[in-house]
């Protein structure tokens, strides 16, 4: 077991990539604080983790709230004794072309994808730096490099990379590794919610866009997150690892 007796908080883990990460970590022995805005999904993931033989507890609410993120970390410490791993995964899209983007669409994405990750890094790091150990994993995106229709989202995901590198420099001397994963096309509800004609076009272009010629799965991202959460990656920090089938090599 690669994460035996470790304690992880995974934001947005009621479904999709976050759920995949939470279950993969639990399979390797970690206890999990499952967070989501969707209570039913979060509780279902808690049950799946218990069925796997590990332990989990749900904290419901938005990462855009400092109080909610504080509650996640407090829950990890009070229920499971500490926090070893923080995965800042929760994210949303409000896709629209630049000249039509509203302040609301901008602000919503920045609040969850950027401010939410700031809270996650800061609040988890306060515990981790005291104990001299921790792994922080932030979920960015290939869209950080630019993607039409995603100005708000790409700004937030590029910001996650900047925060990852700054936090890695500050926290490295304290024994805390901070890395980012930039997933490409991962077949989750987020991708499935795109207009059908866009999905059709992407499928047609797949062999040209993605050298490995398939969409990714939450398990693809979870396996990389597991490596970054484990001590196998103890000399790696401040990195952005693309999990995209070679799309942005
Ligand atoms: N799917 C992809 O192709 C892809 C590609 C690159 C990056 N990502 C990133 O991966 C992460 C997970 O994406 P996904 O595809 O699993 O999406 P998803 O929409 O399937 O799942 C996201 C989960 O986060 C929860 N969530 C949303 N807002 C929240 C908030 N404010 N606080 C707490 N939880 C919240 C949702 O309820 C949902 O359960 C996101 O950060 C996303 O930007 C996804």
Image (cartoon, rainbow, N blue to C red):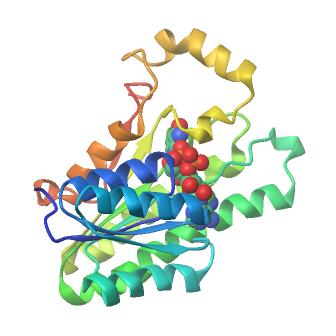
Q: Position of residue 22 (x, y in %)?
A: 36, 57
Q: Position of residue 61 (x, y in %)?
A: 60, 73
Q: Is residue 13 visible?
A: no
| Image quadrant in which the C terminus is located | top left
In the image, residue 33 sits, relative to residue 232, either above or below, namely below
Tell me the quarter of the picture where residue 232 sits: bottom left
Residue occupying the point 18% across, 75% down: 175
In the image, residue 175 sits, relative to residue 227, either above or below, namely below
Q: Position of residue 66 (x, y in %)?
A: 57, 83
The one nearer the camera, 162 or 62, is 62
Tell me the quarter of the picture where residue 238 sits: bottom left
Q: Position of residue 208 (x, y in %)?
A: 49, 10
In the image, residue 32 sits, relative to residue 217, either above or below, namely below
Q: Is residue 131 visible?
A: yes
The one nearer the camera, 79 or 248, is 79
The one nearer the camera, 1 or 213, is 1
Residue occupying the point 67% across, 48% down: 93
Q: Is residue 211 left or right of residue 153?
A: left
The one nearer the camera, 44 or 166, is 44
Q: Is residue 149 left or right of residue 37?
A: right
Tell me the quarter of the picture where residue 65 sits: bottom right
Residue occupying the point 45% across, 47% down: 17
């Amino acid at each position: 077991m690669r994460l035996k007796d470790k304690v992880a908080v995974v934001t947005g883990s009621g479904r999709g990539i976050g759920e995949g990460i939470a279950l993969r970590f639990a399979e390797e022995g970690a206890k999990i604080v499952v967070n989501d805005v969707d209570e039913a999904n979060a509780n279902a993931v808690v049950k799946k983790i218990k069925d796997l033989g590990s332990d989990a507890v749900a904290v419901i609410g938005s990462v855009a709230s400092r109080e909610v993120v504080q509650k996640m970390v407090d829950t990890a410490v009070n229920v499971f004794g500490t926090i070893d791993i923080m995965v800042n995964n929760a994210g949303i899209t409000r896709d629209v072309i630049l000249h039509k983007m509203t302040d609301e669409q901008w602000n919503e994405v920045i609040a969850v994808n950027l401010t939410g990750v700031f809270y996650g890094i800061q609040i988890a790091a306060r515990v981790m730096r005291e104990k001299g150990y921790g792994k922080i994993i932030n979920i960015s995106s290939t869209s950080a490099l630019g993607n039409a229709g995603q100005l708000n989202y790409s700004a937030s995901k590029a910001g996650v990379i900047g925060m990852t590198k700054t936090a890695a420099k500050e926290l490295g001397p304290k024994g805390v590794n901070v890395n980012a994963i930039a997933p490409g096309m991962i077949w989750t509800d987020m991708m499935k919610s795109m207009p059908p004609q866009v999905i059709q076009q992407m499928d047609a272009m797949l062999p040209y866009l993605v050298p490995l010629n398939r969409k990714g799965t939450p398990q693809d991202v979870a396996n990389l997150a597991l490596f970054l959460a484990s001590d196998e990656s103890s000399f790696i920090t401040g990195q952005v690892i693309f999990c995209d089938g070679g799309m942005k090599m």
